[in-house]
Amino acid sequence: MQVVSALAVDHTGSRVLSGSYDYTVRMYDFQGMNSKLQSFRQLEPFEGHQVRSLSWSPTSDRFLCVTGSAQAKVICLYSLL
């Protein structure tokens, strides 16, 4: 993992997204986290583009990811499960 460039905590405070310069978004769930404190999901929204900003939707079922790419991407959590 490289420099963390973006963080977003959902409205309940139970999940967090981190985006970094290694092009990945990692998802953490505080309620389901074990002592290793590892993310439960990792994805690369735009291959070869650093993550610049992350934001949860009001319902926390999707998030917006802005990278160095020319367009933002909305990612639905249900499609990742």
Image: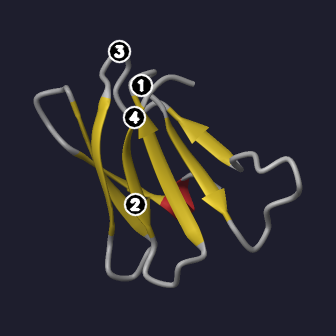
Sort mark 4 into few (<14), some (14-19) or many (20+) by Cα contacts within 10 Å. Answer: many
Disc with the residue nearer the chain's start (1 vs 4): 1
* Image quadrant in which you'd find residue 42: top right
Amino acid type at mark 1? Tyr
Residue corresponding to mark 1: 23
Does the residue at mark 3 contact the one at mark 2 (Cβ under 8 Å)?
no
Please tell me whether mark 1 or mark 4 is closer to you in this view. 1
Mark drawn on residue 64: none
Task: Find the distance from the CA under tag 3 to the CA under tag 2.
Answer: 21 Å
Residue 66 versus residue 79 in the image, above or below: above
Give the spatial CA distance, label 1 vs label 2.
16 Å
Residue 13 higher or lower than 71, as above or below? below
Q: Residue furthest top?
A: 48
Residue placed under numbered mark 4 in the picture:
45
Badge 2 local density, few (<14 within 10 Å), some, or many (20+)? some
Q: CA distance from mark 2 to mark 4?
A: 16 Å
